[in-house]
Image: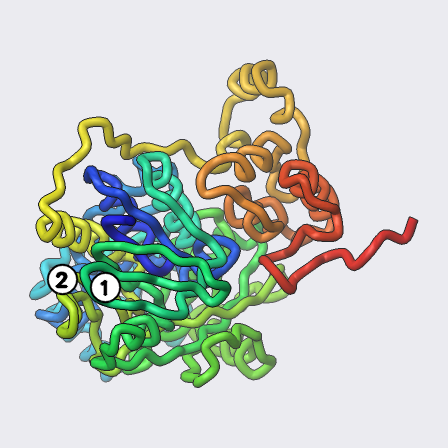
Amino acid sequence: MYDILVIGGGVVGGMILRELSRFNAKICLLEKESDVAMGASRANSGISHAGFDAKEGSLKAKFNVLGASMMPKVTEELGVKYKNNGSIVVGFNDEDMETLQGLYERGLKNGVKGLKIIDQQELRTLEPNISDDAVGALFATTAGIVCPYELAIASIGNAMDNGAELKLNFEVDKIETGEYFTVTSKDGQVVKAKYIVNSAGIYSDKIAGLIGDNSFKIGARKGEYILLDKESGNFVNHTLFFCPTKKGKGILVSQTVDNNIILGPTATEQDDKDDVTTTADGLNDVIASANKLCKKVPVFNSITSFAGLRAYSDRHDFIIEKSALNDKFYNVAGIESPGLTSAPAIGDFIANEVAKDLNLNKKDNFNPTRKADYFFKNLTNEEKNAVIKKIPEYGKIVCRCESITLGEILRAIRENPKATTVDGIKRRTRAGMGRCQGGFCQPVIVSVLAKELGIPYEQVTKSGKGSEINVGRTK
């Protein structure tokens, strides 16, 4: 019997779990995939938004501004890369500049600091590669960039280090209510709990429906991206946006925390909540829009493209509330942009609400810190030699593009939450994320996984069941 179950292992569910692990309670996270951070947290823009876009008085506005203020400390504690690079919303005509003035005023009402309208000359000074057609911009100095899947992995790992449990490959199929909840997975696993927090992303309406709560609907909006090599990492200095529309903040051009350049996303509503394929039309739209925002975008340096799905609700705002049908069941749903930014604040709010309901006390020995998943290449030569002397595996480079060592790969397999797939290793260490996209290091990583997990080489997968990499041996 658990005190609290969190359903959904994305960045919001992870931050909720981490904050709950501060309390004396038996808690567990249920995730239907083979790893955490496999949904929207795996593929999004990685922007910590300042908070000027959300309508004043909305939950988006409230949690965005709070989350943005918490992000520097949270990422420092969890060993997750964060950069306060600032964001720029670009105007191309008088109508755009009026929109930007409205966003500026909304931002002030939301409590956003460091906002200013800049003219064409200042914009070009900040961003030399901006389009010649740009006439001005809204500059938000408090915005930043962060790695979404790193934040999800680190928050869940930190929670597990503080006593939380994680059940992967647990696809919730049935929830029985009564004195407590009985939750059954598709393959027949059963767990029980006093409270449930539903943070299941695009499937949160389905999970709520299992207790008869059909008070909201969640749709899926596909976003396609292109990632450029680090060789182009200084093409822009800030996160650049067009003026936002009803479908979102539009195509952006931004640095990432790892000094790549990311272009995208598109915004295509679709019924299929599993389709994350990229399309020629979508990627062409990304390129065309990026070239309107900037001059001569170095698309020739692209190393990969990908797509992600983001949830949006029919209420057009975050849903963060107890279910009207059961006050021990919390819905945390429709967490679209600025959901990543808001995640620390949402986690803090939900954890404290549930703790009050259950009359929980805080732990005396909670440890909020976690060592960065990959750190070795940032050490001095003296520090590297000291690490290698203690753990020789750090002396062997496996991924040449990203300079990732065998020691880091082994650590990713052994620490919470443990990596069991090639993509799991990639998200934790960046092995396979460089220019060759795993062309050289993948066979070694498969061998290491097979040995560490005690399974045949052929059973190692890219991202879980059905994604086997090798079908058999040729010799």
The amino acid sitting under disc 2 is Lys
Residue 248, image quadrant = bottom left
Q: Horizontal placement of 231 versus 76: left or right?
A: right
Which callout, 2 or 1, points to the residue nearer the camera?
2
The structure residue drawn at horizontal position 42% and vertical position 47%, both measured from the top left corner, is 153
Q: How many numbered discs sit on the rendered protein? A: 2
The amino acid sitting under disc 1 is Ile
Q: Residue 411's x, y, as percent? A: 54, 33
Q: Residue 238's x, y, as percent? A: 36, 56
Q: CA distance from mark 2 to mark 1?
A: 26 Å
Asked if residue 474 is positioned above or below residue 250 in the image, the reply reads above
The structure residue drawn at horizontal position 49% and vertical position 60%, both measured from the top left corner, is 33
Q: Residue furthest right?
A: 475
Asked if residue 421 is positioned above or below residue 336 in the image, the reply reads above
Element on which disc 2 rests: helix
The structure residue drawn at horizontal position 62% and vertical position 59%, both measured from the top left corner, is 303
Q: Which of these two is toward me, 185 or 322?
A: 185
Q: Which of these two is toward me, 105 or 465?
A: 465
Label pair 2/1, CB-CB below 8 angstroms: no
Q: Local crowd at mark 1 within 10 Å, few (<14), some, or many (≥20)?
A: some
Residue hosting label 1: 118
Q: Which of these two is toward me, 321 or 190?
A: 190
Compare marks 2 and 1 and give the one earlier in the sequence: 2
The structure residue drawn at horizontal position 75% and vertical position 52%, both measured from the top left corner, is 458
Element on which disc 1 rests: strand
Residue hosting label 2: 62
